[in-house]
Amino acid sequence: MSTYGAVLLETQHGLAVDLRLIMPEDVLALRQLLSHPDVQRHILVRSGPGSVSAQVEKLVNRMLFAFDPCALHAGIYLKGQQRLIGIVALQNWNRREGTATLGYMLDPAWWGCGLATEAVGLFLNYSVHTLGITRIEGRCTGDNIRSELHVAVFQPLEVPSSCLISVFINVTKVFKLIHEP
């Protein structure tokens, strides 16, 4: 895999969700998702100058329009539908070393339906089998029990993994999937 070339996500089809590139027409749904108070308390909105809405706008623009060789964002859509209900992403992607950090968020209206679990599973399979990633780290705050439970997604995947490590650092929980070919 090229170290700097653009990666166009191939659409991934699951039983209940599809993953595909986030399109400019998804801008309103993406803004609403990133601005939802129940989602915001689980994502890192950097402190510093600028309002939360300005920071959300910066994230929207980065996800929709900016080429970032160290990130890949996929939209989560209900099977066969056009409305964006969430995202799953690789951040801090080091193509040379095959490492990345996994992140995702889902519209709270769809929490508890198994959609994030399916989306994360599809994305992890794609990341390992197509992109060649061998180490994926996921993080969640200590009180985010639903996201912590998604660590179970790492086990039933068709991803050969040699170990799964759960590390607790302050109030952030870190989970790693290591694939040793």
Image (cartoon, rainbow, N blue to C red):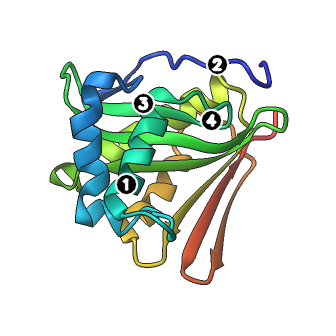
**Between discs 4 and 1, the one toward the N terminus:** 1
- The residue under label 4 is 159
Q: Nearer the viewer, mark 1 or mark 3?
A: 1
**Which residue is at a point 55% across and 16% down the rendered structure image?**
8
Query: Callout 4: helix, strand or loop?
Result: loop
**Left or right, 56 with reference to 1:** left
Residue 111: percent from the left, percent from the top? 23, 54
Disc 1 marks a residue whose amino acid type is Ala
**Between discs 2 and 1, the one toward the N terminus:** 2
Query: Callout 1: helix, strand or loop?
Result: helix
**Quadrant where the C terminus lies?**
top right
- Marks 2/4: CA–CA distance: 24 Å
Disc 3 marks a residue whose amino acid type is Leu
Q: Nearer the viewer, mark 4 or mark 1?
A: 1
Q: Residues within 10 Å of mark 3 (few under 14, many from 20)?
A: some
- The residue under label 3 is 64
**Between discs 2 and 4, the one toward the N terminus:** 2
Q: Quadrant of residue 63?
A: top left
> Which disc number belongs to residue 6?
2
Q: Residues within 10 Å of mark 1 (few under 14, many from 20)?
A: few
Q: Quadrant of residue 27?
A: top left
Q: Residues within 10 Å of mark 2 (few under 14, many from 20)?
A: few
- Marks 3/2: CA–CA distance: 14 Å
- Marks 4/1: CA–CA distance: 39 Å
- The residue under label 1 is 54
**Which residue is at a point 27% across and 45% down the rendered structure image?**
31
**Between discs 1 and 3, the one toward the N terminus:** 1
**Which residue is at a point 51% across and 57% down the rendered structure image?**
151
Disc 4 marks a residue whose amino acid type is Val
Q: Are marks 3 and 4 in contact (CB under 8 Å)?
A: no
Q: Residue furthest left?
A: 109
